Image (cartoon, coloured by chain):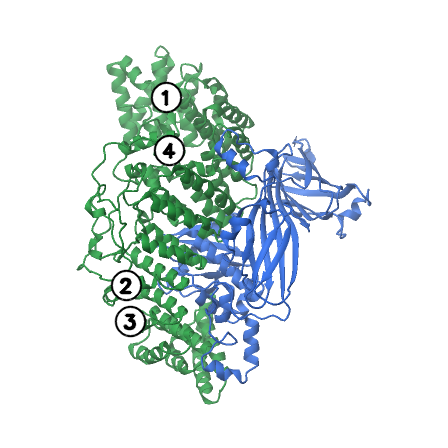
Chain colours: A blue, B green
Amino acid sequence: MGIDGLIILDNAGRSIIQSGFRSTTPAYPLLQIDAVNTALAAASRPTDVDPVIQVQHPSNSDIPSACCHVACGDLRILCPISGNVDPLVGFAFLQTFVDILQEYFGGVSLAIVKDNFDVVYQLLEETLDSVGHPLTTSHNALRDIVLPPSLFSKLLNAATANLAAIGGGTPIQGPPAGPFSSQIPWRKAGVKYASNEMYIDVNENLQAIVNKQGVPLTSSAYGKIEVACRLSGTPDCTLNFTNPQVMTDCSFHPCVRLQRWSRDKHMSFIPPDGHFVLAEYRYTPNTNSNSAITRFANPSSTAPSPKEVVPIPFAIKAKFEVEETTGTNGATGRAASFPGTLSATVMLMLTTRPIENVFVELNLGESAHAIKCVASRESGGLGRGLSALESGHAGSASASWSFDSRKKVLRWEIPNVPPSTHWSLQGSFAASTTPPRPSHALQVRFEIQSHTFSALKVDQLKITGEGYKPYKGVRGRSTGNVEWRW
Amino acid sequence: MAQAGQDAKFFTRGKIEEFKADLHAADAKDKKFVKRKTVLKKIVANITMGNDMSPLFTDVVQSLGTPLLEIKKMVYLFLVSYGRSAKPEQINMVIPFFLQDVNDRNPLIRALAIRTMSYIPIPVVTDALTESLRHCLRDRDPYVRKTAAICVAKLYAADPRRAEKGGFVEMLRDLMLDANATVVANAVAALSEIGDRPDGVIFKLNLTAANKLLSALDESSEWGQIYIMDSLLRFVPERHSDAEIMAERIVVQLQHANSAVVLTTIKILLYLMNYMENRRLIEYLCKKMGPPLVALLSSGPEVQYVALRNILLIIQRRPAVLKNDVKVFFCKYNDPIYVKLAKLEIMYRLARAENCREVLAELQEYASEVDVDFVRKAVRSIGRLAIKVEPGADGCIQTLLELIEAGLAYVVQEAVIVIKDIFRRYPGKYEGIIPKLCEHLDSLDEPESKAAIVWIIGQFADRIDNADDLLEVLVDTFLEESVEVQLALLTATVKLFIYKSKSEKAKELVHKILKWATEEVDNPDLRDRGFMYWRMLAINPTLAGEIVLAEKPPITTDSDRMDRGALDQLLLHTGTLGSIYHKNPETFIRNAAGRALTDSPALNPNSRAVLVHLPRPQIPGPPISVQGRGPVERPPNQPPTTTGPPGLAPTDSLIPGEDAAPAPPLPPRRNPAPQDSHTDDDDAGDDSDNDAETAQNRNDDPYSNLDSAFSTYLADEPKPMGAGAHRGRNDDDLLF
């Protein structure tokens, strides 16, 4: 099994950095790039391209390979694989590499990669072997071998005494025993911080589909526990929850002791240094492990009880009408025009917190134009009856709308929806040639600060093995992605 | 790329001289190597831009004497790019540096040196590498050992015989017992790579070795875990309990954060299940596999796609895994098209009487979307659903009729195609809707849908009052139609004539079309069929009627499932390219080692009945024998090999290459698997029936129906019930 290499393309499809491809012919990476560019050019939307492209060798069909690729900012990163390789290894590696770049440079973009190409090259060398074995990908171990740019430049500038020592062969600034001296592969040895801190973020993402009747068809929340850890030495952490039963189907960072979790639902671990994802889980309301089993044993009861559905924090009513006025308006010279009206209302069901950054998107279909809309706040709280003019402009708390004429997407944005308020969008549009066929689904994205669907609560974070008292913080945040059909 | 090349034309010459001068200048007074570092950095930048820097070889290599890791790294980067094409005297110049660095105090430099050497497959370098590698494999630093392990695989690729003679394979095997988990994982990776080569040493694991590897699992990096688990496919359990204990040990890895680890774990569990006896454990494992698979669907669309393709395979073999999760696969409007299509297929597979209504409502929703391709597949899925789930058929027909009413041309075409199959699945039940179909005759302009409606008109000509009129219009354009439609028209007209032999119009039509088919058409199939009908009608019209209108065997979609043996084999490739394309890798990847279930006393009877044998290609050249120590153990109470022929006897962890001869095939088993309580399937009833059938019907080429099964996205076109491979709508009517 092997990953053949890695190619970073700019937004014009040109290669800016690629790994050595030492075990293949020089033409090979070019073919891969070509295949991806051809596929991208052929697709009407870049997202429609298969993520695994089978690459045909022009002269020798005996050399098969495939190319996994992902878009990443203004870059596209390709990962050619050949032989019978798990494409997921390719994608997992791509993800890991992007994460590493993120950690090193704080972002991934064409400019950043070009500025730091030597570091990117060193990283490529260390993370991927020429025949495609991923090598060192743990950020903590990598920092010992490849210096992050800030440290690197610091060292270049501060060219003094310790350079002699470096010349002697000891790795710079590293612990005396050299890299990989740490007994724990994900944590480097000898970490020291002036102030010890550990922050835990619980982020949940709601994925749901709501049908025409306003009933959720599917709705589940996926949670992620992210940790920013700045602790000296080798601390041993134990994280307890008051309601661990809301977490099902958990997956963990390798540092978590799985036995301990299955025994008493305590997450016990020696954390990596820096930022990492401790665990991911799915939230199922009313979790009762027995119910899952009985449901399994009894296949006739397929429909999940309503309790198993995560409630959606808002409701939408949408109406859409198209009149067909064929040839009645002879004066304009058009054979047919299809004026339509639409109206939609968002109501917040949540009573405790506002939801923020609500984006409602609707694809109006080909040939839609002449969009006119009024986004307003209908009722609830103060500010009732705001005039259309005011709300149409971007006040911090008012709604606005826009139309992407290239993608034919109508976007309605409400920065802040306080509890129990109603917001509405009324508008009209026209389509010239064909009857408009807007998509039958509104895509809604939103955020809720300091709220989790599962109400997962950290009971205690114990840190043992070290003498200091660290600062600890926990925070919750929810995002959602709901498809609302009408 | 092209632009960079142009830049090169302009600047290369000047720059190379410049760099040369800079390098020499750096020699003079550059105590902190700052200048040298800057120049090298520029040179490396130029390499990456595609400019040829090879003329600088001699000058750059001189910098290797600089005792600074940063500089060494860049020089080695340069060597990796140009070492292969360097002149012999240039390479000879580098060798002393290599040998010096291999003994450096810094483990990073030692590792860097052997790694770079292994990238340059030139005999001189390989010579130097062979000696150094031996020491590095025993280096006290794990970083050097793990790098050295991978270098062995590269040495093997450069010169297999030398690597074997040098005893490197044995050294790798010893590294599998190393204290450091990363070293173990890399040794396994190297051995696997060697084992996958068609000319490589066979790499097999026995129980002790497998258990040793498992204990290194927890400390390995995620990639190491993938290597180690993947290598477990080389372990053939001899007892049910071996497989069961091992599965219990690795099942916890399903909670890993890395999706590739999860999918590899699932692959191994599916493999081990073939050797298990304990039904409750199998059920438990199936239940455990569902949630992590579903969780993969919350990742990015790329991972989703790979996951979905694999799920499609897994649920065909182990339907219990995601039995109740059909809702997870409902498509969102914003999903990329490839994700939608994969989800659609899975929804159809998971549809049962209990969830049919939900699935149908969902499919109906999709049929109103904008994307033509997706809408067509959705409509087709509704038809397939009707054929698969009898209680839901009424609802499906209703939905299809509503869609036809809406009148979108491509929807109507697709609906007509599936309705034709529904008529065959439920004879005498839904023919009442034929008039509605005929109303939309004009909107059918694609061959497949046209052929379908022609078939319907011909087949039910006795119930359609104006069948002769309809056919007359259609026949008019006979000579311009595609062969598919021509064949359908020919048969339909003959049917019409047999139903209504009194009608003048029918007589006239059949005469016209037979004449055309036999005289005006070049296609031999069409001509032959024309002649045949003509003779039949001329000799004995009554008998011809009996033949042409003979009762059709009803169709089903059950036989569309992939052959069990082939499925077992494909599942060994879960999470690989093969599972994405649903083909066995050796059929499309050169040099891919095939994988097949290996027989052992523990293999359960159902899997054995459909066992596929895999000949290992015979390698020319003298036999190589590799002696060596290592964990060698046979299970104490292993029964004398009663089941397999000698060639399949359990073997030690490494077999010499001479055993690489094709394994003699098992004596053909005429008896289908005993259908007792030990069936390993969750839907036992359904599957054991299939087993009995497939065991007998299986043809010699296990892939023969794979290609056809997955050539189009919609794998399973309805086929005649019980009939083996023969399909094709054209000969539906010709039951020879």
Q: CA distance from mark 2 to mark 3?
A: 14 Å
Of residues B240 and B417, which is closer to you in this image? B240
Q: Position of residue B622 (x, y in %)?
A: 17, 60
Residue A399 visible within the image = yes
The numbered disc on residue B492 is 1
Q: Position of residue A22 (x, y in %)?
A: 37, 65
- Chain bearing tag 1 is B
Q: Position of residue A379 (x, y in %)?
A: 79, 40
Of residues A248 and B447, which is closer to you in this image? A248
Q: Amino acid at mark 2?
A: Glu
What SS does tag 1 mark?
helix
Q: CA distance from mark 1 to mark 4?
A: 27 Å
Relative horizontal placement of residue A157, taking residue A77 as reference (left or right): right
Which residue has dot 3 on it? B130
What SS does tag 2 mark?
helix
Circle 2: is it few (<14), some (14-19), or many (20+) Cα within 10 Å?
A: some
Which residue has dot 4 on it? B560
Q: Amino acid at mark 3?
A: Thr
- Chain bearing tag 4 is B
Which residue has dot 2 on it? B170
Closer mark to the observer between disc 2 and disc 3: 2
Which residue is at 47% across, 46% downward? B305
Q: Amino acid at mark 1?
A: Ala
> Which sits earlier in the primary sequence, circle 1 or circle 4?
1
Q: CA distance from mark 1 to mark 3?
A: 75 Å
Relative horizontal placement of residue B321, taking residue A460 as reference (left or right): left
Closer mark to the observer between disc 1 and disc 4: 4
